[in-house]
Image: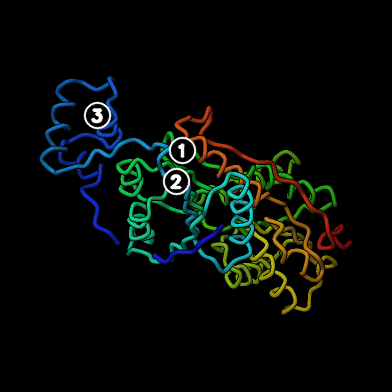
C-alpha cells in the first residue's frame, strides 16, 4: 500500500549543534551518543556536558519488532516518468516485504537550494521505520538530524557523494558513458559531443568521464568546446545543441546524458532542418518511456531505475533489522539499447 504525504513538529537540538557546542566534529559527537569506545576521555566529557546542557534527547535504537511497518520514500518530484519508475520498484519490493510506503515530494527549498527540514520532522511524527531518498541533496545538519533520531535511511542515486558510512544505490554511470561513446565510435563518428547534466552531480560527472575515456582509448583528441552542461533540463539542452551546431566544425554525433534532454536536442536539430540520424546521431541515457516514443526512437543507455529502487528498499530493510551492509555503495549495471537514432556519419 502506498500513501502520499505533503511536506512540522519541533525537534530538539541536532547533533551538529551539539558538536559545535563541544568543539568537535559531528562524527565524534555521534560516537559519544552511540557509546563508542574510540573517543578520548576529555572529548567524551565535553560532548556529554554539551548533550546535557542543550537537552539533547538520546532516542532508543530502532527496534524492528516494535516499530510500525512503514517507510518513507522522499522524491525530488512526482511529475516525471523517472519518479514513476522509482516508485514502481519501491512499491513492488514493499509489497513483497509487507510494508506500507508514504511518498513525499520534497519540493520546498531553502535559499541554499536544499530541501527544507519539514518533511524530515514528519518522519518522527508518523513513526516511520526508515527512509529512501531519491535524487536528494542533504546538508550536514540534515544527515546529523537523521542520526540523532536513529532513523535508518538509504540514498537512491544521490546528487552528491554521501558521507562515509551512508548506504546508497546507483547505476554504473561511468560505464554507461563509455558504452554510449563507444557505440558512436564504432559507427565511424569522431566529432562526438556530450551534453551533460549539472557539473557537480555524481552521475553527470561519471558519464562525462566515461565519454572522455572512450575517446582517449580510440586515440581521439578531447575537444573542450564539445562538452556542454544543461542541468538535465530539456530547454537548456535545446540551447546547448544550438551552440554546438554554430561551431565552425559542429559534431556529427552527440551523447546526451538524459532522455529528457535528448528530446530538446531533437527539437534543436529540427529547427535547423537537420534529420536524426542522417545528419546527427543522438544517444540518450535512462531508457524512459519517452525514448521509445521519440521519432526516431532514441538509442539510449538503460539504467535500471526500478531495480535500483527495489535494491535500495532491501538494503533499508537490512538496516532496519540492525545489519550493516558489507559495502555502502551498490551500483547496478547499465546497457545500451539500440534503436533508430544512430547511424554512420554522412560522407
Q: What residue is pinned by disc 3?
A: 32
Mark 2 or 3, closer to the camera: 2
Quadrant housing residue 218: top right
**Percent coordinates x, y for residue 190 in the rendering:** 77, 52
Q: Are marks 1 and 2 in contact (CB under 8 Å)?
A: yes
Viewer-nearest of discs 1 and 3: 1
As helix, strand or loop, the secondary structure at mark 3 comes to helix
Q: Between residue 310 and residue 271, name the one nearer to us.
A: 310
Residue 63 at x, y = what percent? 40, 36
Quarter where residue 284 is shown: bottom right
How dense is the environment of label 2, judged by Cα within 10 Å: few (below 14), some, or many (20 and up)? many
Left or right, 292 with respect to 114, comes to right
Instruction: Give the distance between the C-alpha atoms of the residues marked 1 and 3, in whole angstroms.
Output: 21 Å
Q: Residue furthest right?
A: 347
- Reading the image, the residue beneath label 2 is 130
Circle 1 is placed at which residue position? 320
Number of residues whose C-alpha sits closer than 10 Å to that of mark 1, classed few (under 14), some (14–19) or many (20 or more) = many
Amino acid at each position: 500500500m502506498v500513501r502520499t504525504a505533503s511536506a512540522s513538529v519541533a525537534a530538539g537540538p541536532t547533533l551538529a549543534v551539539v558538536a559545535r557546542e563541544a568543539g568537535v566534529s559531528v562524527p565524534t559527537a555521534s560516537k559519544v551518543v552511540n557509546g563508542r569506545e574510540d573517543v578520548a576521555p576529555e572529548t567524551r566529557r565535553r560532548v556529554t556536558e554539551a548533550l546535557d546542557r542543550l537537552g539533547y534527547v538520546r532516542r532508543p535504537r530502532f527496534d524492528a519488532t516494535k516499530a510500525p511497518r512503514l517507510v518513507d520514500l522522499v522524491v525530488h518530484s512526482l511529475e516525471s516518468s523517472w519518479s514513476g519508475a522509482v516508485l514502481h520498484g519501491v512499491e513492488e519490493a514493499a509489497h513483497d516485504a509487507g510494508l506500507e510506503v508514504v511518498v513525499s515530494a520534497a519540493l520546498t527549498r531553502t535559499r541554499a537550494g536544499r530541501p527544507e527540514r519539514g518533511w524530515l520532522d514528519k518522519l518522527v511524527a508518523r513513526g516511520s521505520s526508515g527512509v529512501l531518498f531519491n535524487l536528494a541533496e542533504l546538508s550536514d545538519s540534515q544527515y546529523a538530524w537523521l542520526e540523532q533520531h536513529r532513523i535508518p535511511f538509504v540514498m537512491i542515486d544521490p546528487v552528491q557523494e554521501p558521507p562515509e558510512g551512508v548506504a546508497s544505490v546507483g547505476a554504473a554511470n561511468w560505464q554507461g558513458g563509455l558504452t554510449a561513446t563507444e557505440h558512436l565510435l564504432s559507427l565511424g563518428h569522431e566529432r562526438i559531443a556530450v551534453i551533460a547534466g549539472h557539473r557537480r552531480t555524481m552521475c553527470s560527472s561519471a558519464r562525462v568521464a566515461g565519454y572522455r575515456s572512450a575517446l582517449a582509448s580510440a586515440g581521439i583528441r578531447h575537444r573542450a568546446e564539445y562538452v556542454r552542461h544543461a542541468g538535465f533540463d530539456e530547454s537548456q539542452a535545446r540551447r546547448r545543441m544550438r551552440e554546438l551546431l554554430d561551431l565552425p566544425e559542429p559534431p556529427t554525433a552527440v551523447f546526451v546524458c538524459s532522455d529528457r534532454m535528448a528530446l530538446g536536442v531533437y527539437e534543436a536539430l529540427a529547427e535547423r532542418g537537420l534529420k536524426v540520424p542522417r545528419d546527427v546521431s543522438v544517444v540518450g541515457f535512462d531508457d524512459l518511456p519517452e525514448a521509445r516514443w521519440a521519432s526516431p526512437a532514441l538509442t539510449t543507455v538503460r539504467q535500471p531505475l526500478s531495480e535500483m529502487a527495489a535494491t535500495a528498499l532491501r538494503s533499508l530493510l537490512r538496516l532496519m533489522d540492525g545489519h550493516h551492509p558489507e559495502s555502502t555503495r551498490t551500483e547496478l549495471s547499465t546497457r545500451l539499447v539500440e534503436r533508430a537514432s544512430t547511424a554512420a556519419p554522412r560522407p
